[in-house]
Image (cartoon, helix red, strand yellow):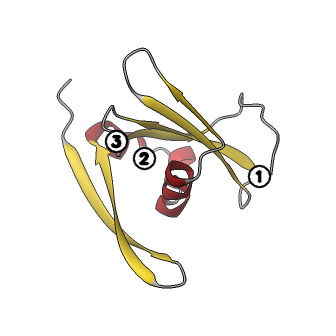
Amino acid sequence: MDCSLLAFSFRRLNSTQQELELKTTQYFKYMRKRPDRAIILDEWITRVIQFPEKTEVQSDGRIRKWGWISEESKFLRIILLEDGQTVHNAFFDRSFKETQQ
């Protein structure tokens, strides 16, 4: 698969401010233009990648991660490439039924 990578820098506030890089595919960039995807913040994506409530590896090696986004009262599903760092897709998953924290 030939996926061009794009890098976005953003700031996340912790006890100290640090710059994190979010690597994405061209597909992610294209899909993010949709109104239902445009509202998803990089901060939420990073939160789910770092602290998922559930993780699964697909048969093609891609990694699915889910996390509860309290600001939206929804579960966010992130699909990462096999490298575990590059975001291929991110969307609110209406079918995911896990206990909310």
> Which residue is the site of mark 2?
32
Q: Residue at (40%, 27%) from the top-left corner?
A: 62
Q: Mark 3 or mark 1, which is nearer to you?
A: 1
Residue 61, by quadrant, is top left
Distance of label 2 from label 1 (alpha carbons): 20 Å
Name the side, left or right, on which 94 lies relative to 87: right
Q: Mark number for residue 73?
A: 1
> Which residue is the site of mark 3?
30
Number of residues whose C-alpha sits closer than 10 Å to that of mark 1, classed few (under 14), some (14–19) or many (20 or more): few
Q: Measured from the top left, where is residue 59 in percent x and y? A: 43, 14
Name the side, left or right, on which 30 lies relative to 100: left
Q: Residue at (32%, 36%) from the top-left corner?
A: 27
Name the side, left or right, on which 44 lies relative to 29: right
| Number of marks present in the image shown | 3
Please tell me which residue lies in front, 11 or 49: 49
Q: Measured from the top left, where is residue 52 in percent x and y? A: 60, 46
Kindly state the secondary structure of the residue where label 3 is placed: helix
Marks 3 & 1, CB-CB < 8 Å contact: no
Distance of label 3 from label 1 (alpha carbons): 25 Å
Q: Amino acid at mark 2?
A: Arg
Q: Residue at (71%, 33%) from the top-left corner?
A: 94
Please tell me which residue lies in front, 83 or 8: 83
Q: Measured from the top left, where is residue 48 in percent x and y? A: 56, 50
Marks 3 & 2, CB-CB < 8 Å contact: yes
Distance of label 3 from label 2 (alpha carbons): 5 Å
Kindly state the secondary structure of the residue where label 1 is placed: loop
Q: Measured from the top left, where is residue 90 in percent x and y? A: 49, 42
